[in-house]
Image: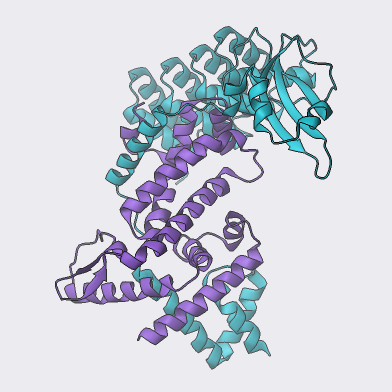
Amino acid sequence: MKCEWVRQNILLYVYEEIADDARYELEQHVARCAECARELEQVREFHAAMKALPVQEPTTNLLAASRMRLQESLEGTRQNGFWQNLVLEPAVWLRQIRFAPALAAAIFIAGFAGGVGTAYKVVAGNSRPVSNVTEISAPVTKSTISGIRSISQQPGSNQISIQYDTVSAQEAQGSLSDQRIQQLLLFAVRNTYKTDVRMDSVDLLAQKPEDANIREALMYALCYDATSQVRLKALGALKPYVKSDIRVRNVMLEALLNDTDPGIRTEALHSVQPVRADTSVRTVLNRLAQKDDSEDIRSQARTELALVPQID
Amino acid sequence: MSWASASFPVKCISSRIDDTVRVRGVQAGNGAAFEDLVRQYDQAVLRLAMHFTGSETEAQDIYQEAFLKAYRNIGGFRFECSFYTWIYRIVVNLCLDHLRKRRVRKEDAPVAVDEEGKTFDVLEQVPDGRAAADPERDLMNRELSSRIRRAIDHLSPRERMVFELKHYHGLKLRTVGEILHTTEETAKNTLFRATQKLRGSLADMR
């Protein structure tokens, strides 16, 4: 019976969760059936009644207070995981695993040679690229254990599998199309304090912005790198994608508004010229024309706005 | 860090940077990236916590716990879901935890008496920012809203959360399902049950 189907779907209809074709059928039916129309009316009333408990927007004060409290808590936290305390202390973590002493001999270790070598200082280690090659190595006496990734035991057996990272000086050679080289460069952009190393990485990655992962790393560099030269380099590489990739455009707009270096803001301004007619770009240009610290940039923004074709 | 006191964020612009860029930034130890993530989501987090718990103080606690939890665990985030879903899951679970704790406390819940001599549960009060321009209408609204609160109280925590997310925050049932680690179909059925119960309760109270 059609009414039954309609009754089951009225709620979805009111909550706008109903499929388009089903919506049409329901509306058609309700126009002809008084009972179902009544039910619809009641559900709508219920829906409206529940609004007597309105959702309130957090006040500015509440938000600011919450943020400040969070900031204080964060300043007291170090984002250092479990692993940092276990360096060079295998005895400690062995004791923590509950297994019979006899199993000690049966530990099967798959080792990864991770880390980017002692030439680079590694920051928070949570996002290291995992090499897919697992080598069953001999006792790792020459390397330092830098972290334990995971420990698992096969149920019903005495086999334990432990994944750990070691830091050992390594060198990789290859061209930019080499996956391993790319991975290391992407890692370097985000994970090293050494400015010259980051600069070198961005320099190389800038040669291959057609790759989406590389573009993402370049966007990261433009947003977050502490050194303006690096950000500028990334910007230059991303420029040709402003029109085709909306994420690039948005990152460019963000740089335009928030980058502390006026040279970069100027470059970003030039880079959005091909899309100056876009609404979001015009909004930003307007803001820039009024609020930017640099008179030069304000006037450039005004010039750009003047060049925007008047659509309305 | 002066971001906490910065002028109200231009969130419409900065929201466009992919969450992926920000999350990877945080994973690499970049504090500014985390600040961006917080600014992106914190209003929604507070809004949800405030409405669900009905208490500003509890909402603030949930806010702290949620973002600290996110900060501590973001290293293990593997992009199997969106960051949006992930942060909502954290907040939803914290809200449900608080609800559970509150139900245990309710036996000795403080009760107060208002100007008309009626008792009301202190824990239920949320400061109403709206000015009382029409006292009679305001009274009716308050009665209705306390009836609704009581009706919602009779829902199971899950039903309550599904209803909250769908009705008050407009999330799609599919998203609600993802957040609660279940299917859209289950979320749909939970919504049905919740609305049946609510309609029943409200009808009884008339």
Q: Is residue B51 left or right of residue B182?
A: left
Residue B54 location (% of width, % of height)? 35, 60
Residue A221 location (% of width, % of height)? 56, 22
Q: Nearer the viewer, residue A265 or B125?
A: B125
Q: Residue most toward the bottom?
A: A34
> Which colour denotes chain B?
purple
Residue B187 location (% of width, % of height)? 60, 66
Q: Is residue A224 above or below residue B182?
A: above
Numbered label tally: 0
Q: Quadrant of residue B138?
A: bottom left
Q: Is residue B107 left or right of residue B18?
A: left
What residue do we see at 35% from left, 47% from top?
Answer: B60
Q: Nearer the viewer, residue A116 or A153?
A: A153
> Which colour denotes chain A?
cyan
What residue do we see at 19% from left, 66% from top?
Answer: B132
Q: Is residue A206 above or below residue A95?
A: above
Residue B125 location (% of width, % of height)? 28, 63
Residue A64 in view (yes/no): yes
What residue do we see at 35% from left, 67% from top?
Answer: B107
